[in-house]
Image (spheres, grey):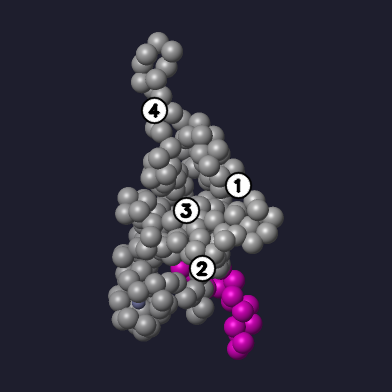
Amino acid sequence: MKRDRYTGPFSRTSLPAWRCPSCIEGSLKLVPKSLLIKETVRSLSYHGHEDWEPDWTEENYSALFQCIHCGEHVFSVGKTEVVEVYDDEYGWCLESALQPTYFQPAIQIIPIADECPDDVKVELKSASSLFWTDLSASANRIRTALELILTHKKVKKTQITTSGKRKALSLHRRIELFKAKDAQLAETMLAVKWLGNAGSHTSSLNAHNVLDAFELLDHVIENMFVEKLKKIRKLTKGINKKKGPVPSK
Ligand SMILES: [Zn+2]
């Protein structure tokens, strides 16, 4: 994952090559002259203050991007942040860099495999969309995607207590149950769960923590639903178990 694509602010002169949400193959390019930046009324009112500094500036932007491969258009809005940039002619100067809060249609943080179940895809798309504006909510969606994955893998959601009542199992307990099937992947799931929990209980998550969660979940999805990887894992397991070649089918 190219993390610098997702951790702004982004200089207007070197915007990341975000992946197109429609064709996934192409990257997005800013449509010339589409970028509009407007300073807020409150920010304008500060200009007369004797202590005014450029970093007091508050601006919002809107911009249009287009995929260089399929031509899809993607709209973005967000804020700006004053950053120092190096200019060959003028040396170090200040620039309003872009900090997106929304993309429509949402750009995908991780490419979602076709084999991934639809309900998991929906949660991952939401997680990608929310990433720019609410990291905790994004991490929560990733956690929900993990719950759904366990359901697809037939890990039970409830159990009957000694008093005969049906009780919902926690995500932690469900991951423990999955351990019997694949201990290594269960470990990865547990890490996703801790990050998801942090999203629910605190606001201390930063963009890198949430990108970690995306990356770990991507690993889980690839190993569970992508046929090629599943075959390789099965083959590896078989050969190691026999400590030699397995009969070919
Ligand atoms: Zn495209």
Image disc number at residue 184: 1
Q: Give the Cα separation between the discs numbered 2 and 4.
A: 40 Å
Residue furthest to the right: 243
Q: Is residue 86 magenta?
A: yes
Identified by mark 4, the residue type is Thr
Q: Which residues are magenta?
A: 83-99
Name which of mark 4 and mark 3 comes first in the sequence.
Answer: 4
Residue 42 horizontal side relative to residue 176, left or right:
left
Image disc number at residue 224: 3
Identified by mark 3, the residue type is Met
Count the marks.
4
Q: Find residue 209 and report its horizontal and vertical position in percent.
A: 56, 51
Verify CB contact (< 8 Å) between mark 3 and mark 1: no
Label 4, secondary structure: give it. strand
**From what the image shows, is residue 136 above or below residue 122?**
above
Residue 248 seen in this snapshot: yes
Q: Give the Cα separation between the discs numbered 4 and 3.
A: 22 Å
Q: Find residue 173 and report its horizontal and vertical position in percent.
A: 50, 31
Identified by mark 1, the residue type is Gln
Name which of mark 3 and mark 1 comes first in the sequence.
Answer: 1
- Residue at coordinates 60% horizontally, 54% vertically from top-left? 237
- Residue at coordinates 51% horizontally, 34% vertically from top-left? 177
Verify CB contact (< 8 Å) between mark 2 and mark 3: no
Q: Give the Cα separation between the discs numbered 2 and 3.
A: 27 Å
- Residue at coordinates 62% horizontally, 87% vertically from top-left? 88
Verify CB contact (< 8 Å) between mark 4 and mark 1: no
Mark 2 vs mark 3, foreground winner is 3
Which residue carries the number 2 mark? 5
Q: Nearer the viewer, residue 95 or 223?
A: 223
Identified by mark 2, the residue type is Arg
